[in-house]
Amino acid sequence: MADPVKRPYRSRRRWEQAEQTRERVLDAAGALFRERGYERATIAAVAAAAGVADETVYGHFGNERTLLGQLVQRAVRGAGRA
């Protein structure tokens, strides 16, 4: 007997929540990088400022360098992101 085909799970609400969390993390990281500098702004501090777990920051961005790169991309794109 063949396995039934499963429908992929897609939740617009969950996607929106994840995007809001991502933006909160970026906002917190930007503020901490300006305040403390790149070397002294840790993932733990970014997570605490954003109100999320460290694992959430790692899950979205992987590391501090990628987080900084995403901030740069967001700055280049400006407020009216695509």
Image: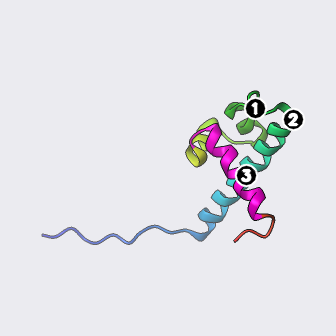
Specify which label sits upstream in the sequence, 2 or 3.
Answer: 2
Image quarter of residue 51: top right
Q: Which residues are magenta?
A: 62-77
Secondary structure of the residue carrying tag 1 is loop
Q: Residue at label 2?
A: 35
Amino acid type assigned to the residue bearing label 2 in the image: Glu
Amino acid type assigned to the residue bearing label 1 in the image: Ala
* Res 57 visible: yes
Q: Between tags 1 and 3, which lies in front?
A: 3
Image quarter of residue 45: top right
Magenta span main SS: helix
Give the residue furthest to the front.
76
Q: Is residue 6 magenta?
A: no
Amino acid type assigned to the residue bearing label 3 in the image: Val
Alpha-carbon neighbours of circle 1 within 10 Å: few (<14), some, or many (≥20)? Answer: some
Image quarter of residue 35: top right
11 versus 71 height, above or below: below
Q: Between tags 2 and 3, which lies in front?
A: 3
Tag 2 and tag 1, C-beta contact below 8 Å: yes
- Marks 2 and 1, Cα distance to the nearest angstrom? 8 Å
| Residue closest to the eye, 25 or 68 | 68
Alpha-carbon neighbours of circle 2 within 10 Å: few (<14), some, or many (≥20)? Answer: few
Coloration of the structure image: rainbow
Give the residue furthest to the left.
1
| Residue closest to the eye, 6 or 81 | 81
Q: Quadrant of the C terminus?
A: bottom right
Residue 41: give its label.
Answer: 1
Q: Residue at label 3?
A: 72
